[in-house]
Image (tube, rainbow, N blue to C red):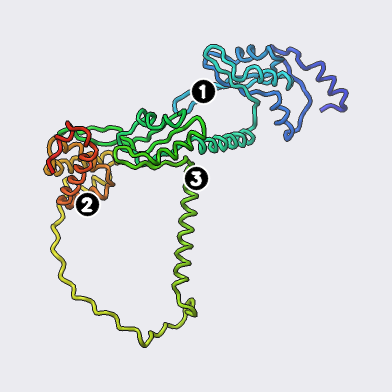
């Protein structure tokens, strides 16, 4: 700290830019901490888009054409095994930094697409990213369509054929889950559609047409359900609001059923009306019919509960297959076993405890296949006659 302003300005003028021990001095007026971010952001740029071949000196050289670069650096970060390279360039004045941003941002040079924006502190950048995310979500709500009740055979190509009549499509996503199927005695895993899809249209008006049009369509016997996409937070909020309204309605109904003048809270017990008929006599109950004894599981229940969900499905499939084969044939047993494995784990365990019920499930599966294959004579031949 100098005694007066004149001495400080003289030191800045004479020392700034001077070479000392192979270093270039940078001398400038002191700025309080709470005033630094705005001034620094006017001169500091955040840069990315380049690869590992670009050094810090190369970065400074590339940006020096826009003005005097007072400091620079390159860094890298790794996320999920993917390395990302970025850097910072600080100019002597805000005009040079703004000129570099205007000319370099979005520019393509070889394999590099430059991303150049003013450097921001963490809180400012977080606020900006939050605002950008909200804008994206609002845009997705207008352009994205969520479809339910699709057949398991649906994929992105079939979905594109189904929706292309409504307008340009940006992207399609069909969620899948692992499914165990049997081919004879051999078991294998395959990815199967969950029966839903999300289609992102280029224009909001095309998404509106798709919501109306898809509701009128039936695919492989399935009546489709289509909605405008909403984020999970909004769906959870709407569900909570709906449950709250139902509870309020039930409370109002109970209030309406109470006779006028009935004491509320803890009052004395009401005396019965003299003309109230006595309660009807209960009919004699017949003794319960004997139930078939529960079957033994072909595996230890303790081992089953400790196994992963994938191993549990495999154990259930191996236990179900002989029963399914008993009520179908060699060509269908694997297919139907895979269909049954779509049920929840508790239901499958109940089937194994009462294997006679498996026959009913197999018959239901055969009728589903008969309906789905009605236009495929070769596949219909594999089904048992009615």
Residue positioned 44% across, 36% down in the render: 210
Q: Which residue is mark 3?
A: 233
Label 1 SS: strand
Contact (CB < 8 A) between labels 2 and 1?
no
319 vs 176: above or below: below
Instruction: Specify whether 331 is left or right of 88.
Output: left
Corner quadrant of residue 165? top left
Real-space CA distance between mark 2 and mark 1, rounded to the nearest whole angstrom: 52 Å
Crowding near the residue tagged with mark 1, few <14, some 14–19, many ≥20 C-alpha atoms within 10 Å: some
Residue 199 visible in image? yes
Q: Position of residue 248 (x, y in %)?
A: 48, 62
Instruction: Name the image quarter holding the N terminus.
Output: top right
Which residue is nearer to you in this view: 287 or 128?
A: 287
Instruction: Name the image quarter holding the C terminus.
Output: top left
Residue positioned 69% across, 16% down in the render: 69
Q: Position of residue 109 (x, y in %)?
A: 56, 12
Real-space CA distance between mark 3 and mark 2, rounded to the nearest whole angstrom: 35 Å
Instruction: Specify whether 382 is left or right of 99.
Output: left
Which residue is nearer to you in this view: 348 or 71?
A: 348
Q: Which residue is mark 1?
A: 84
Q: Which residue is mark 2?
A: 350
């Amino acid at each position: 700290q100098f005694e007066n302003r004149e001495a400080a300005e003289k030191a800045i003028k004479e020392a700034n830019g001077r070479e000392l021990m192979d270093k270039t001095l940078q001398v400038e007026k002191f700025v309080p901490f709470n005033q630094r971010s705005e001034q620094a952001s006017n001169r500091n740029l955040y840069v990315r888009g380049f690869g590992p071949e670009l050094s810090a000196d190369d970065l400074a050289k590339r940006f020096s054409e826009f003005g005097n670069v007072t400091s620079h650096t390159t860094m890298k970060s790794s996320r999920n095994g993917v390395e990302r390279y970025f850097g910072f360039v600080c100019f002597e004045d805000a005009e040079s930094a703004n000129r570099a941003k205007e000319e370099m941002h979005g520019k393509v040079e070889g394999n590099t697409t430059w991303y150049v924006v003013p450097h921001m502190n963490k809180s400012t950048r977080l606020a900006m990213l939050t605002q950008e995310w909200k804008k994206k979500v609002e845009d997705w709500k207008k352009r994205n369509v969520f479809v339910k009740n699709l057949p398991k055979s649906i994929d992105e190509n079939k979905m594109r054929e189904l929706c292309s009549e409504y307008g340009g499509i940006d992207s399609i996503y069909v969620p899948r889950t692992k499914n165990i199927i049997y081919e004879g005695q051999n078991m294998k895993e395959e990815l199967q559609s969950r029966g839903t899809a999300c289609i992102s249209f280029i224009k909001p008006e095309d998404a509106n047409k798709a919501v109306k049009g898809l509701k009128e369509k039936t695919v492989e016997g399935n009546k489709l359900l289509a909605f405008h996409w909403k984020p999970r937070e909004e769906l959870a909020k709407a569900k909570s609001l709906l449950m709250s309204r139902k509870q309020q309605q039930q409370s109002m109904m109970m209030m309406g059923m109470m006779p006028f003048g009935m004491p509320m809270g803890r009052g004395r017990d009401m005396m019965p009306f003299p003309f109230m008929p006595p309660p009807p006599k209960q009919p004699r109950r017949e003794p319960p019919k004997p139930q078939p004894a529960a079957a033994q599981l072909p595996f230890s229940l303790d081992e089953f509960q400790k196994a992963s969900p994938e191993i549990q499905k495999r154990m259930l499939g191996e236990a179900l297959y002989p029963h399914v084969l008993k009520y179908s044939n060699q060509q269908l047993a694997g297919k139907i076993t895979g269909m049954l494995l779509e049920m929840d784990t508790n239901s499958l365990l109940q089937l194994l405890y009462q294997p006679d019920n498996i026959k009913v499930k197999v018959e239901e599966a055969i009728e589903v296949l008969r309906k789905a294959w009605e236009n495929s004579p070769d596949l219909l031949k594999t089904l048992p006659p009615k």
